[in-house]
Image (cartoon, rainbow, N blue to C red):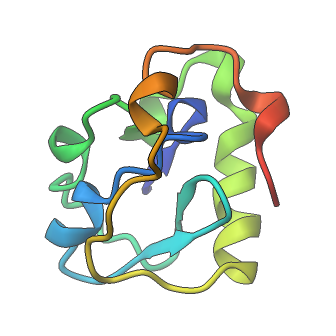
Amino acid sequence: MAYVVIESCIRCKYTDCVDVCPVDCFYEGPNMLAIHPHECIDCGLCEPECPVDAIMHEDEVPQDQLEFIEINEAMSERWPNIYQIKAAPNDADQWKDVKAKRHLLEK
């Protein structure tokens, strides 16, 4: 099992989670992060670090977010690895409370 980045991350892309990951299993897309499910060691250190609650255990992903399990796996194979914290996008705070952002995902 692994942790999953869900829709809340889109257009926010805070990287606090990256800084605590002991195995560098995060990957950076144009406007969100993904966790590689085969690299994640299920430690859970990243989950409390996310300021928008965009990370959860695969077993706890809500029904309306299940497609993000597949998105994380697919995008972590395409996007570059990120292992150091970066500044969030300039408009991240404007997007952190927006719920319906799936249509904004850039692959």
Q: Position of residue 2 (x, y in %)?
A: 43, 56
Report the residue at 59% width, 14% height from top: 99
In the image, 93: left or right of 105?
A: left
Is 73 displayed left or right of 97 in the figure?
Answer: right
- Location of the C terminus (image quadrant): bottom right
Residue 100, by quadrant, is top right
Work out whether 45 lies above or below 93: below
In the rendered image, the vertical position of residue 37 relative to residue 1, given as above or below: below
Q: How many dots with numbers?
A: 0
83 lies left or right of 2 = left
Q: Nearer the viewer, residue 88 or 65?
A: 88
Foreground residue among 100 and 35: 100
Q: Quadrant of residue 45?
A: bottom left
Residue 49 vs 73, above or below: the answer is: above
Farthest front residue in view = 90
Q: Is residue 94 above or below residue 44?
A: above
Residue drawn 32% across the image and 62% down it: 87
The spot of residue 96 in percent (x, y) is: 43, 25
Foreground of the two, 97 or 67: 97
- The residue located at (76%, 30%) in the rendering is 102
Q: x and y percent of residue 26 in the render?
A: 44, 71
Quadrant in the picture for the N terminus: bottom left
Describe residue 1's horizontal placement relative to residue 47 as left or right: right
Q: Residue at x 52, y 76 (%)?
A: 38
